[in-house]
Amino acid sequence: MRGFTGENVLRYALLLLVLVLTVGPFAWMLSTSLKGSGEDIFTEIPAFLPQQPTLNNYARVADSIPVWSYIANSLIVAAMAVTGNAVGATLAGYALARLRFRGMKLLLGLTLGTLILPGEVTIISQYVTVRGMGLADTLLGVALPGAIAMLNVLLMRTAFAAIPDEMDEAAIIDGADAWQRFVRIGLPNVKGMLSVVVIFSFIGAWDDFLWPLIVLTNPEKYTLTVGLQYLSGAFSSDPRLIAAGTMIAFLPIAVVFGVAQRFFFRGVEEGAIKG
């Protein structure tokens, strides 16, 4: 076969290995969540396909914990985080990329410096700040620290910096102020990167476990990731329920990415703007 060389074989073998390592655990969890109570999942050679497929495990999850309430809380936190990053990171990124002001390089350096620190280093100071603001045990207190992520600010700065300077210069000659240049020139050219920021913000807020666990004490305000710990504690001997709960937590992420994937890949590939 033309073009079928050892290099191609190695390439496809590596791709297959990556596929198994990334998709394999998800597929196994989905299979486990669909297995009936009569199936033995602890056999020496477990079956991948369910012999008695059922959705009863998902119904048992809803009966065991207030999963819909936890999902609503997670959606509220994710919505606040997405809104904060979409607005705040976009404005900050534009200011760092397109505006000139005293101390800009110092501010950019401090922004880069925050990426070096692991989240565990600042989590105590974040909690003290949130508690001092009276936002402990609130969903706003959960969303606030991630409302403007520095990584998202840098992503937006990179996107805005790729816009040719000539476009801004022409707008200035026409009498456009900074806000008009932001709305009419900046935003239309960074929609792809903005979708990347939205997806990252949603996934980060939805999957976060440690920070909501620290801030929230009222079980009625738990997010889904925190609420699912009760599922694993109460039914640790039944992996079917744990797998079903995990799939429930994963589905919204899959939906968001599926809807925005076209914009996501366009944003990842954005490197320059031709005009």
Image (cartoon, helix red, strand yellow):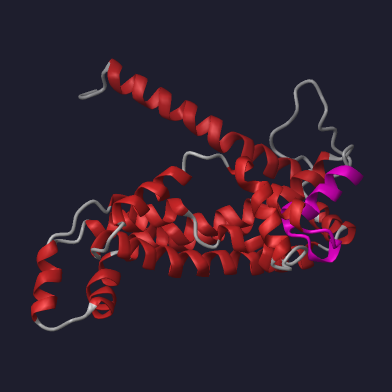
Q: Residue at x 70, y 55 (%)?
A: 128
Q: Residue 106 colored magenta? A: no
Q: Is residue 149 above or below residue 95?
A: above
Q: Which residues are magenta?
A: 216-234
Q: Is residue 261 above or below residue 185?
A: above
Residue under the point 67% across and 37% down: 28
Horizontal side of 104 relative to 272 (left or right) equals right
Image coordinates of residue 118 in percent, x first then y, are 56, 39
Q: Nearer the viewer, residue 50 or 232?
A: 232
Residue 101, percent from left and from top = 26, 63
The answer to whether residue 217 is magenta is yes
Residue at the extreme bottom: 175
**Is residue 34 something one can see in this rendering?**
no
Residue 138 against residue 237 in the figure, above or below:
below
Residue furthest top as drawn: 6
Do we see residue 111 in this rendering?
A: yes
Q: Nearer the viewer, residue 118 or 262?
A: 118
Q: Determine whether, in the image, residue 170 is placed left or right of residue 25.
A: left
Q: Is residue 150 above or below residue 46?
A: below
- The image quadrant that residue 42 belongs to is top right
Q: Position of residue 154 (x, y in %)?
A: 37, 53
Say left or right for 52 vs 145: right
Q: Position of residue 275 (x, y in %)?
A: 11, 64
* Residue occupying the point 27% across, 71% down: 188
**Magenta part mainly helix, strand or loop?**
helix
Among all residues in the image, which is located at the extreme front? 102
